[in-house]
Amino acid sequence: MSTFSTGRKVASFASLILGLVLAIVGLALSITKAGDLILFTIPISGKATPVILGRGTMFICGIILFFVGLYLFPTLKYHRAIINIIFLFPLLFAFAVTVIIPLVLGIGYSFTDWDGIKLTGFVGLSNYLRMFNQKSFLWSILLTFLFVVFNMILVNLVAFLLALLCTSRIKALGFFRAAYFLPNLIGGIVLGYIWQFIFSNVVTKFTGTYSMLSDTKTAFIAVIIVYIWQYAGYIMLIYITGLNTIPGDVLEASAIDGANPTQTLFNIKLPMIAPTITICTFLTLTSAFKQFDVNLALTNGKGSVQFLGEYIANGTEMLALNIYTTAVINNDYALGQAKAVLFFIILAAVSIIQVRISNKKEVEL
Amino acid sequence: MKKKLMSVLLAGAMVASLAACGTTGTTDTTATTSDNTTTETQTTETATTEAAATETATEAAPAGDAGSVRLLNGKPEINDQMQALAAKYNEETGNTLIVETIGGDTNASDELKKMYQADNMPDIFVIEANQAANWDGMLADLAGEEWTDKTGFELVDASMGTIGFPYTVEATALGYNADLLKAAGVDPASLTSPDAWKAACETLDSKKDELGITAVFGWCAEPTNLGWSSGTHVFGQYLDAGLKADDTTYIDLLNDGGKIDEARMKNFAEFIGMMNQYSDPALLIDGTYDNQVAGFKDGKYVFITQGNWCVTSPSDVSFECGFAPYAFEDGINTIIAGPPSYWVAYANGNVDGAKAFFNWCAGDSAQSILVNDAGLVSPFDDCKYEAVNPFYKSMNSYITAGNYSGWHTMLKKDGLQNQTCNIFADYAKGKLDADGFVSTMAQVISSYYAQ
């Protein structure tokens, strides 16, 4: 009557049960801090050496046995679904542990008074209220938006010009491409320190005044310059790919029709790479929002500014750095977490808009 | 069939490797007994593999009562000496000290939070005085230990008792180059009033070429990298200069919602104004710590706004060093001296081991390493080694005369230095005048405390 042998059924149920038991005991030993199970001891050179069944071993063996049991589970109808689950499990597990659980915990922490060590109680929305009452935080939001707008325009402009240069018929093309891309391979912290030296020891030799970094406005410009220098090469590569995909016959046809280079650029090349422009715009947008390392290394957010009638001491501090400073330097982890939740919402909104617009464009093409 | 065999083998290899990963590092929890009668759990408190099996139970107790102690060191520059200290400790007592050093810019308190969350706390770790509250109820009370009789620098907390072991004493004030002062005919002992300072600055400034100096002060108000110097140390002079070590008048006022004494702040501002005026402009606004210290060591600056940590070895300087007070009011004659940070024992860790180590560390052989090799200044009265630090003589004369103030600047709200350092920078750039400095300070501090 059954398509499954008794052996398989027994193997399946036995593995499932044994696996569950082992996993639960292993977890319980860890949670109660009871240590490992000692099965028996063997006297080796006079000392009683224990043979241990580690709680970690128990847990992992338990999980694996459980999946073996699941695989052998006597069903035809759901076999495919079970296989899918088994294959997806490692990825889903890793995703849950590194992304989903921290996200949920983080949102939870933002409603508490957690200081990184102790959690004494829930404070409701007061972290969120405090956050919006901090003029320095409002300044950081404003500054981040400014930074994003400047960068979106400037990085794309510079990158596109570089791409035009690198697709023209100049010599040593490979060298130029590599040279423009290279800054992107250097970490932001290192870049920040290199440019700090350049701004305060080299540029000052020419300008004769004090460093650009010591004044809020010029320091902000400095951060933008360094960021463009770092990121334009990367965006340039994408534009190069875009420009190379323009069919040669279209360009040839326009040349025969008598289009000059400017007309070719604005009427042929730009419309042809519209999807590339969308991608690059959003890439620069999201990465500029998340700007942290250059900001930290170059100015560490310092600089004074008058904002809403108050003297603000974090003139060049953008959102990500503000979150870090709030949590780690000012030792206010819960408030930092609340800010991080807002940051997440902003970025999620931007990403969703990006996906929507990209999809629309693809349909139009 | 072959395929099946292969897959079984592969699966077996995966299970074995996972199991191997699972066993490492899982045996370091404290022991309790399991409910099973035939199996017993392993005692791992001593980090040895000695099992608490019944037949060997008598052997299982560790040799001393101290056992192994883990220490988290926050000073990467003395890591080698700390390792030597651990070796010496093991050699003399048989106990083990494991020193872990938090390097470079990594913040020890931040790292400790991670260790705490990971249930991997060291038995002894470093804290600054204002961090004690974060660890409320988690630090061991060390009152009554032998070493507490030999020092007045231990950290005492209102709720937890004596919690901090002072491992070094650091001092900050205006460090001076005694040879240059002598050449200019300025007596450093006379620098105890704003007028005396002004006169001295004018004299030194007028003899710049003769003395071969760039500027009178090596003072840097750059906020990005040196914010700790202006925002914590120089600001600390406003809180403590002229006060006895246990006088907490201005820090109490500050921590009471961020209030400042405006009259005192005004005097302080004028003194800082004088420092700005007679500083090296190349250093003042966008200098670095390295430039500042190098300039002082080369004899380009007469005064430096750092502490005894900036010149640690006698071979670094060819002149005599000393400290002069920030005398922004008449009669101020103190420097700030004391332990900037402490070693504390984690209450859930090996407290007995930590206590044993502290007592040993206050003794002769440990002090020899810390003072002679690591260049620290001993906080213990019976230490017979004279620190090699070039500032030590001057520092010691202030301490023995009782003319030292506390490091109460470490008790201000976390992160305040990042706010105030910008005001010092703007003052140095001339964006603010003395009155503006005072009013901005008042506004920034009160709004920071209100957050």
Image: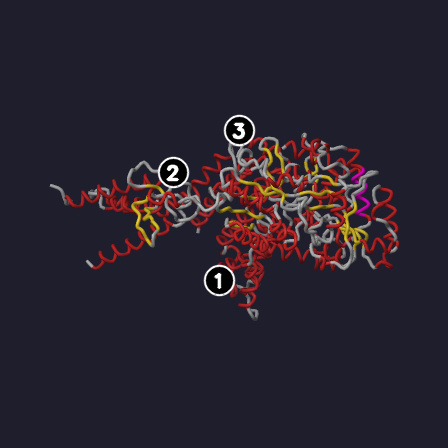
Q: CA distance from mark 3 to mark 1?
A: 56 Å
- Mark 3 / mark 1, whichever is N-terminal: 3
Q: Do dots 3 and 1 share one subunit?
A: yes
B349 vs B317: above or below: above
| SS for callout 2 | loop
CA–CA distance in space, label 2 to label 1: 69 Å
The numbered dot on residue A194 is: none
For discs 3 and 1, the disc positioned in front in the rendered view? 3
Q: Residues within 10 Å of mark 2 (few under 14, many from 20)?
A: some
Give the magenta range: B267-276
Residue A244 image label: 1
Residue underneath mark 2: B32
**SS at mark 3 in the image:** loop
Q: Nearer the viewer, residue B122 or A303?
A: B122
Q: Is residue B270 left or right of residue B124?
A: right
**Of the residues shown, which amino acid type is indicated by label 3?**
Val
Q: Is residue A19 above or below residue B290?
A: above
Which residue is labeled 3 in the image?
A: A123
Relative image position of residue B371 (x, y in whole percent): 65, 52
